[in-house]
Image: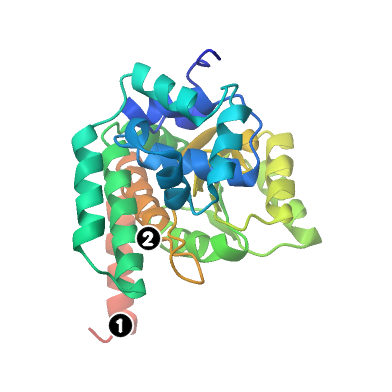
Amino acid sequence: MPTTPPLTETDAIAPGPSGRLLRLFDGHRLTPTQRRIAHSLVRNAAEAPFLSSVEVAELAGVSQPSVTRFAVALGFDGYPALRKQLRELGLGDPDAVDARRETQHDVVRNEQQQAVLTEIANLQHLASVLADPEPVLRAARLLAASRPLLVLGLRAGAAQAHGFAYFAAKVHPDVRLLNEGGSMLLDRIEQAAQAGATTLICFALPRHPRELLEALTAAKRAGLTVVTVADSAFAPVAGLTDLMLPAAVGSSLIFDTACAPMMLGRVLLQAMCDELPGAVSRLEEFEQAAAGRGLFVG
């Protein structure tokens, strides 16, 4: 029976049952499919010890044999042994499983409804892990202290990075958005570090571009602290991240939905404002300038 690895930085935002699950999985080299299964179990920690391998496969959107291979990859003889370990860890609430099964049988949902309900579940999970505010507060202190502050997001993560940088620039004196790849990207990271940057915040959403890993490698080489908002603590960027803040994406539609990562970004902005002594005055100055220019119609 494998032993439970020690607590790591990547699961610092997930106290309680979710954190205990993360510690069980930490230190194992998992395939993308296996990371998806692990992430589904973390998100459904209250139900995990009472789910069948078929139900786990349905939650993760994988085949039942993939769940068995996942258990073996963790060092167990099969899924029953893994489920037994989950119960011994004191995880789970059988009533939650019964309630979910009843809901599945009683409610008929179309594809659009299911996508919305998935996003609601992602936000509820985010609310539960934010019960421990320390990881967000630590990230906020790092972001507020960095001059300049680098905000990185490529491809699917570009929109989240752009939105964060747009609002951050209203309160932070020097925000630099990195939302395009190419040979200049690494130059901009190195130049920012030379200008005094100490922290880079990265939005990493699937599918994760190879260029993103190259950019984070350059950031670490330049001595920057990396804070990452990712779809999972098992994202490929985890090994290049100093402080991981996971927020699940929805995959019910043809393109992923990212309400929880966006919400986590706004939570970080709020916490960063609290760490910046001049944030309120900068906002007031912006509002006065905007009014003078007639920038907004309402």
Three-letter amino acid code at disc 1? Phe
Left or right placement of residue 179 versus residue 16 in this view: right
Q: Which residue is mark 1?
A: 296
Q: Quadrant of residue 73?
A: top right
Position in image of residue 28 (x %, y %):
62, 27
Q: Is residue 89 at least partly visible in the picture?
A: no
Left or right placement of residue 208 versus residue 119 in this view: right
For the point 27% across and 78% down, the residue is 291
Q: Is residue 11 at least partly visible in the picture?
A: yes
Q: Secondary structure at mark 2?
A: helix
The crowd level at tag 1 (other Cα within 10 Å; few <14, some 14-19, many 20+) is few
Residue 233, numbered label: none
Position in image of residue 125 (x %, y %):
31, 45
Position in image of residue 286 (x %, y %):
33, 67
- As drawn, the residue found furthest toward the right would be 183
Position in image of residue 182 (x %, y %):
77, 63
Which one is in front, 53 or 8? Answer: 53
Q: Which residue is mark 2?
A: 259
CA–CA distance in space, label 1 to label 2: 26 Å
Question: Residue 194, relative to residue 16: is it above or below?
Answer: below
Q: Quadrant of residue 77?
A: top right
| Quadrant housing the C terminus | bottom left
Question: Residue 103, relative to residue 244: is it above or below?
Answer: below
Count of labels in the image: 2
In the rendered structure, which disc, 1 or 2, sits on the residue that comes first in sequence?
A: 2
